[in-house]
């Protein structure tokens, strides 16, 4: 299941490559998950696109996850929210850190 139809993790990496966001691309390649959980990568990418662009990036808010799943009437449970937080932690770790001047 995914919001983006039949999108897979590979589709997501290709979409992210078009944006040029290297941190997101690295995160999508690091997170290896079974096909039945690839919908979480698509959900996370959608949540990240809607998140404010802050430097350093902040975690996706719980409220945003609840609003997203509610708006699309997605059957989310605590497992999904926990995995989205874990994916987001990896994504944040992959974002290039600013070099001190």
Image (cartoon, helix red, strand yellow):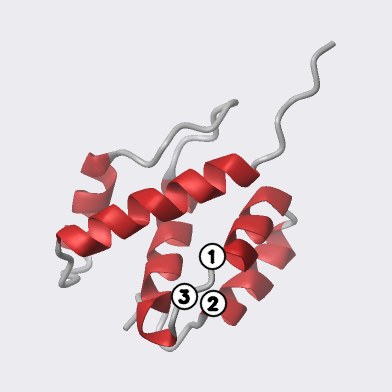
Q: Residue at x 53, y 72 (%)?
A: 32
Q: In the drawing, does residue 1 fall left or right of residue 79?
A: right
Neighbour class for label 2 at 10 Å: few (<14), some, many (≥20)? many
Q: Distance between the residues labelled 3 and 2?
A: 8 Å
Tell me the number on the disc at residue 101: none
**How far across and down, in percent of the image, does residue 72 sit?**
22, 67
**How far across and down, in percent of the image, does residue 88 sit?**
45, 48
Tell me the number on the disc at residue 33: 3
Q: Looking at the image, is 9 positioned above or below residue 70? A: below
Residue occupied by mark 2:
9
Are dots 3 and 2 in contact, CB under 8 Å?
A: yes
Q: In the drawing, does residue 51 fall left or right of residue 1?
A: right
Label 3 secondary element? loop
**Quarter of the image where the C terminus is located:** top right
**Quarter of the image where the N terminus is located:** bottom left
N-terminal label among 1 and 2:
2
- In the displayed orientation, state which residue is furthest to the right: 101
N-terminal label among 3 and 2:
2
Q: Distance between the residues labelled 1 and 3?
A: 6 Å
**How far across and down, in percent of the image, does residue 24 sit?**
62, 54
Are dots 1 and 3 in contact, CB under 8 Å?
A: yes
Q: Distance between the residues labelled 1 and 2?
A: 9 Å
Q: Nearer the viewer, residue 32 or 62?
A: 32
Q: Residue at x 22, y 41 (%)?
A: 63
Are dots 1 and 2 in contact, CB under 8 Å?
A: yes
**How far across and down, in percent of the image, does residue 4 sit?**
42, 78
Neighbour class for label 3 at 10 Å: few (<14), some, many (≥20)? some
Q: Looking at the image, is 87 positioned above or below residue 57? A: below
Q: Looking at the image, is 65 positioned above or below residue 1? A: above
Residue occupied by mark 1:
31
């Amino acid at each position: 299941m995914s919001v983006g139809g039949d999108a897979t993790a590979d589709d997501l990496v290709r979409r992210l490559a078009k944006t040029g966001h290297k941190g997101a691309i690295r995160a999508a390649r690091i997170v290896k998950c079974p096909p039945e959980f690839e919908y979480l990568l698509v959900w996370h990418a959608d949540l990240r696109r809607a998140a404010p662009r802050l430097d350093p990036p902040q975690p996706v808010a719980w409220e945003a996850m609840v609003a997203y799943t509610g708006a699309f009437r997605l059957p989310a449970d605590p497992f999904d929210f926990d995995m989205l937080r874990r994916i987001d932690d990896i994504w944040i770790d992959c974002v290039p850190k600013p070099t001190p001047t």
